[in-house]
C-alpha cells in the first residue's frame, strides 16, 4: 500500500533495485554498459549461441528478437537501445575452460556486427577465442563490419551467412534502417568467398507484396547465383511476440493497402496455409530458373 505524503523517502523496493547502469546516446541509440555471468548459451539452431549485446541498432521492423524485451525491459523502443556486455570476452574465456567444442550460431538475438561493435570489438574478440578453441562459427549478419574480421575468421571452421530481405535498396532502408545496404551485403558474400570461407544466404523474412513476388524472388536468386553461395535459406514472415505492432507501423507509413494482407498471412490459419504453398512454389520456380534448386535448404 502506498504511503501518501512521504515521497522523498526511498521505499524498501527502491533500496532493492540495482543501480541503473550509466548511459549515453550514440547515433540515436541509448548505450548502457552491463555485466554478464555467462556468454555462451545452449541453442536450438546450433550447439551454442552468444550475444555480446542486448538490443540491436539495426532496428529491423520485423525483428523477432524483440522478445528479448520481455526479459530485459527498456523504456526505449527496439532498435533504440543497446546494452553492452562489457565483460563478454572474460565470461567466454572462463566458460571455454570447461566446454566441449561445438557449433556456434553467431549471433542469435542481435547482430554481432551492429554499429556499436565498431567501437567495442567484443564479437571480434569472442570469435577469435572460439576459433582458437576449435569451435565452428555459423555467422549470420546484415553488416559489412564483419569484413573487418576476415583476418581472424579465415582459416577457421567458419561459415559466413548474410540475410537479405528484399533486393530493393529503398525497401531495405525502410525495414532495416541501421543495417548495411543490399550492395554491401552482396560484397560481404563476395569477399568471404574470395577468402575461402563457405558462404550462405538467408532470404527472410520474405515480405508479402514486397519481396515475395516472382519478380523479387527472381532478383534475390540472381544474387545467390552471382555470389556463388553454397546454401540458400528462405522463410516467410512469422507471427512472433511483439512483432505485429512494429510491422503495422511500417505498413501504415509506407504501404497501408498491404495491412490486411499481412494480417491474414500472419493470423488467419487457412489463408496462411495457402500462402505458404503458393510462396513455396514461387521460390522453387525462382531457384530452378537460377539453376540453384539443389542449394535450397
Ligand atoms: S539485424 Fe537481426 S537482430 Fe538486429 S534488428 Fe535486424 S533482425 Fe533484429
Image (cartoon, rainbow, N blue to C red):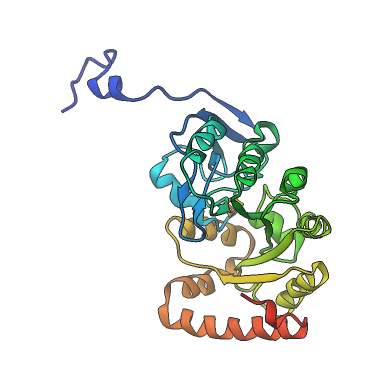
Is residue 163 positioned above or below 16 on the image?
Answer: below
Quarter of the image that includes the N terminus: top left
Quarter of the image that includes the C terminus: bottom right
Is residue 170 positioned above or below 267 on the image?
Answer: above
**Image coordinates for residue 197, horizontal then vertical, percent:** 75, 58
Residue 210 visible somewhere in the drawing: no
Seen from the viewer's position, the closer of residues 293 and 219 is 293
**Image coordinates for residue 117, horizontal then vertical, percent:** 66, 38
Is residue 158 positioned above or below 99 on the image?
Answer: below
Identify which residue is drawn at 45% across, 38% down: 38
Horizontal relation, residue 264 to residue 184: left or right: left
Horizontal relation, residue 74 to residue 247: left or right: left
Is residue 203 positioned above or below 85 on the image?
Answer: below
Horizontal relation, residue 124 to residue 93: left or right: right
Seen from the viewer's position, the closer of residues 150 and 21 is 150
Horizontal relation, residue 168 to residue 207: left or right: right
Identify which residue is drawn at 51% across, 22% down: 22
**Image coordinates for residue 199, horizontal then vertical, percent:** 72, 62
**Image coordinates for residue 232, horizontal then vertical, percent:** 67, 71
Seen from the viewer's position, the closer of residues 231 and 8 is 231
Snapshot quadrant of residue 198: bottom right
Identify which residue is drawn at 80% across, 67% down: 227
Residue 235 visible somewhere in the drawing: yes
Task: List the single residue furthest toward the left.
Answer: 1
Amino acid at each position: 500500500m502506498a504511503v501518501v505524503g512521504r515521497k522523498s523517502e526511498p521505499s524498501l523496493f527502491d533500496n532493492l533495485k540495482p543501480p541503473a547502469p550509466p548511459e549515453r546516446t550514440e547515433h540515436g541509440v541509448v548505450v548502457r554498459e552491463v555485466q554478464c555471468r555467462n556468454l555462451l548459451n545452449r541453442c536450438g539452431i546450433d550447439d551454442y549461441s552468444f550475444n555480446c549485446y542486448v538490443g540491436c541498432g539495426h532496428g529491423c521492423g520485423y525483428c523477432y528478437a524483440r522478445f528479448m524485451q520481455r526479459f530485459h525491459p527498456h523504456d526505449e523502443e527496439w532498435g533504440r537501445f543497446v546494452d553492452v556486455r562489457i565483460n563478454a570476452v572474460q565470461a567466454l574465456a572462463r566458460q571455454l575452460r570447461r566446454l566441449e567444442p561445438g557449433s556456434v550460431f553467431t549471433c542469435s538475438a542481435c547482430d554481432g556486427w551492429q554499429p556499436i561493435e565498431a567501437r567495442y570489438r567484443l564479437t571480434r574478440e569472442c570469435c577469435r577465442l572460439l576459433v582458437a578453441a576449435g569451435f565452428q562459427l555459423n555467422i549470420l549478419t546484415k553488416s559489412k563490419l564483419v569484413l573487418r574480421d576476415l583476418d581472424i575468421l579465415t582459416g577457421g571452421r567458419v561459415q559466413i551467412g548474410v540475410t537479405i530481405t528484399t533486393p530493393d535498396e529503398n525497401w531495405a532502408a525502410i525495414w532495416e534502417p541501421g543495417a548495411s545496404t543490399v550492395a554491401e551485403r552482396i560484397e560481404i558474400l563476395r569477399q568471404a568467398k574470395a577468402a575461402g570461407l563457405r558462404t550462405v544466404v538467408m532470404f527472410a523474412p520474405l515480405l508479402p507484396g514486397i519481396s515475395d513476388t516472382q519478380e523479387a524472388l527472381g532478383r534475390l536468386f540472381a544474387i545467390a547465383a552471382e555470389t556463388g553461395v553454397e546454401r540458400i535459406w528462405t522463410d516467410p514472415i512469422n507471427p512472433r511476440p511483439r512483432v505485429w505492432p512494429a510491422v503495422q507501423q511500417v505498413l501504415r507509413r509506407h504501404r497501408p493497402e498491404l495491412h490486411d494482407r499481412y494480417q491474414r498471412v500472419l493470423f488467419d490459419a487457412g489463408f496462411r496455409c495457402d500462402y505458404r504453398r503458393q510462396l513455396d512454389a514461387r521460390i522453387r520456380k525462382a531457384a530452378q530458373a537460377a539453376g540453384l534448386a539443389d542449394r535450397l535448404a
